[in-house]
Each structure stands twice: as structure tokens, then as C-alpha cells.
Image (spheres, rainbow, N blue to C red):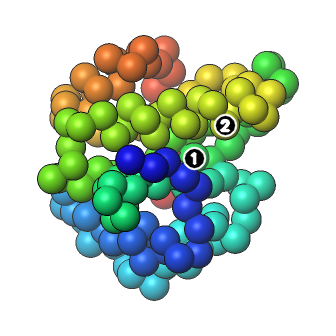
Amino acid sequence: MQIRKGNAEDIQSLVEFNQAMAQETEGLSLDNDTLTRGVSHLINNPAQGFYLVAEVDGEIAGSLMVTYEWSDWRAKNYYWIQSVYIRPQNRRQGIYKKLYQAVKTIADDNGGAASFRLYVEKDNTKAQQTYSALGMEQSYYLMYEEK
């Protein structure tokens, strides 16, 4: 398995993974053009974040996205992990664990992180168990949103 940063050649795969994740977790079909623009934007603007992909036998088996949030209290970025997707046939093989470790290594190489954060669906207990097993804990904070 090879873990690497995503690049322009990965855009279509990342779009497909995001579509699959949205359908699987929320029953949503995302607009393909908007999603392609969104993925492309981050690939082309690394100051805002990055994608990591896990390749198995030359094929992308999983990916995640990281975006940054500056903390004035800690004078470091929070690393927000988003858009996590592992192909069904590659789940429970330690791919997310390796992707997460790569995120932590990248943060260390860049001066550290205030913390590592992510959102998880309330009913996605398998993902919650994975995150807990890797040392993450449910946050003290609740999230509010206006659309």
C-alpha cells in the first residue's frame, strides 16, 4: 500500500469516492459539476488543505481530505479530516489507520496541529469505533449550522 497526496490525475476518482460516500452515508446524490469544481479547487490550492489517497495494487482504495482551521488560542491549525472513503472491498484492512497516521506525520512536519478533528454521522457506529480505536474522542463541542 502506498499513501500519497492526491493530485490532478486523481480528481475523477476523488469525485467518484465523494459521490459514493454521500450516497452511502446520507442518501444524497451530489451535483457532479459542483463536486468536480470543489475537488479541483483544493487540489489547485494546497494552502487550504490536501487530499491523501491510499493505493493498493496501483488502484486508489481509499482517500480523505484535510482542511485547515487556524486557532488563535493555540497558534496552530486544526486539521479537519473530511470526505473519508474506503472502497467497500478494502474496508477493515487498516487503510484509514495508515491515512490518519500520514495526516499526523504531515502535521508534525509542518509544526504540529492544535488537534485532529472530523465529523461523523451519528448512526455510523463502525466509523466511530474506528476513530475511537485510533485515539480520537467525542468532542466537547456541539455543532450549529445555518444554510
Labels 2 & 1 near each other (Cβ < 8 A) = yes
Label 2 sits on what residue type?
A: Ile
Rendered view: 3 above or below 141: below
- Quarter of the rendering containing residue 104: top right
Residue 76: % across, % down: 79, 28
What is the secondary structure assignment of the residue under circle 1?
strand
Whether residue 25 appears in this view of the structure is: no
- Residue at image position (24%, 37%) is 93
What is the secondary structure assignment of the residue under circle 2?
helix
- Residue at image position (54%, 52%) is 4
Q: Residues within 10 Å of mark 2 (few under 14, many from 20)?
A: few
Q: Residues within 10 Å of mark 1 (few under 14, many from 20)?
A: many
Location of mark 2 (residue): 106
Relative horizontal placement of residue 66, taking residue 127 as reference (left or right) = right
Location of mark 1 (residue): 66
Of mark 2 and mark 1, the one earlier in the sequence is 1
